[in-house]
Amino acid sequence: MAAPLHLQTALSLRTEQRLALVPRMLQSIEILQLSVQELVARIDAELERNEVLELRDGPTGAEHPPEAEAPSHGAAERLRGAVREEEDRPLPRGSAEDEDPKLALLQNLPAGAEDLLDSIRLQLAWLQVSGPLRDAVLALAERLDQRGILGASDAELAEAVGEDVLPAALATLRALEPRGIGARDPVELLILQLRADDPDRPRLERLLREHLADLARGHLAQIARATGWPLADVQDLVERVRSLDPHPLAGFDPRPAGVLRPDVEVRVSGGEIEVRVDDHDLPSLGINALYRDLAQDRHAERAVREYLRAKLESARNLISAVEQRRRTLARVARAIFARQKGFLERGRAGLRPLKMSEVAAELGLHVSTVSRAIAGKHVATDFGTLPLRAFFDGRESDTPGEGAAGSGREGIKEQIAGLIRGEDPHQPLSDDGIVALLAARGIRVARRTVAKYRTDLGIPATWQRKRFTP
């Protein structure tokens, strides 16, 4: 006979550690690995979708923010539409799980640039526009700037195409694709992209012409107050404006490559290493006082307060993440160049082997944090602007304990190139000879290593470099 089974319940306490990546930590990790250009774009996007976040006086030269007004029931009322829209917003169609990665890659490949004048000629031929009008439209198209705007004065345009044909030529040009070309200013460039029969066109025009500054700063509540429109309607109109293209000619003329902006500047002054994080392009961020007070107003509706508190938390997390990025990048850069001072004195020939784990151990950071901090970042030095990752030369020395300046991978390559530049062309150095010269400098490498680095540098073998006397 089987023994009876006894079941018991009991309570017990135990202590354990778990790593939980809260949204604030995830955002901080994401911000850390952005370059300064990418971070500016991220901040611009956040300013558009978070009305609580605003620009302060700072490097961007933003205007002084308006004085905070006392929170009122009317302000809460105008936020109702935003709250309902936030709650009822449907999930986007085609989630990441359903997306075909190969199809997404093909869809994101840039198309070849098309010539604008050729496109306009084809459209004019399709519309059967010929004679002086066709020539006038092409003459106007040649005067478009990179955005598609006609910056010349009316007198200059009339002189170029003729005063009598100018109105018809301008109207014809504005009717062509891409919509928006032929505008006289950036606002008109967007307005020309609206359909003439669009029922929202009058309000969109008013929004662009009269409230562009508030629109750029994301002050939707102020727009609603000035126009008398419901805040939900203002948000819908703003989404319509965002769908307009401020650069309709981007697909025709390839944009010039952007200037490489270093994220860090490093100099040696008086024997001391100076490290400065170049965040001049980053806007100075702050919290809108009106929304902050409204979120704490007990007279405001609960849904409105919860909506604003979530926005406040997001804005504060972003501001904190940007500041933490600056501090971490500065600490990592100082640790790097404390070990790579030879580079600051002699260039690439002064690089020494360095691993991310060394910097991480000194700063008390995880290796992945150091990797994210230097990802896509560049540093400006007296020897040029280089990727921060180039200073992590984790070459395993052929002789244990070797780690002097110039013994890193790039440092050895530079020394090999220098030795070959100074060799006798009639008696060029062999790989064994280079090994011996490097050993005399205290750098021990194998012959196969020299041969590999020489090949990487595109330097031919000894017999190919030898010059014979006639």
Image: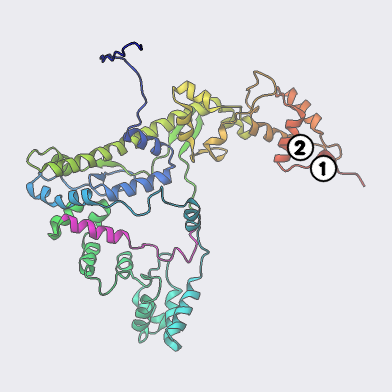
Name which residue lies at 42% across and 67% down: 145
Query: What numbered label is drawn on residue 113?
Result: none
Reading the image, the residue beneath label 1 is 465
Residue 118 coordinates in the image, percent (x, y) = 50, 75
Cα distance in 3D space between marks 1 and 2: 10 Å
Q: Amino acid at mark 2?
A: Ile
Q: Is residue 255 magenta?
A: yes
Reading the image, the residue beneath label 2 is 420
Residue 375 coordinates in the image, percent (x, y) = 49, 38
Q: Amino acid at mark 1?
A: Arg
Instruction: Locate the N terminus and report the quarter of the image it occupies.
Output: top left
> Residue 274, can we see it?
no
Q: Is residue 96 magenta?
A: no
Which picture quadrant has residue 353? top right
Q: Residue furthest bottom?
A: 131
Q: How many marks?
A: 2
Name which residue lies at 37% across and 85% down: 165
Q: Nearer the viewer, residue 1 or 430?
A: 1
Left or right of 395? Residue 234 is: left
Q: Secondary structure at mark 2?
A: helix
Image position of 435 with respect to 47: above or below: above
Which segment is the magenta one? 231-256
Image position of 429 with respect to 283: above or below: above
Name which residue lies at 44% across and 84% down: 134
Residue 82 coordinates in the image, percent (x, y) = 19, 51
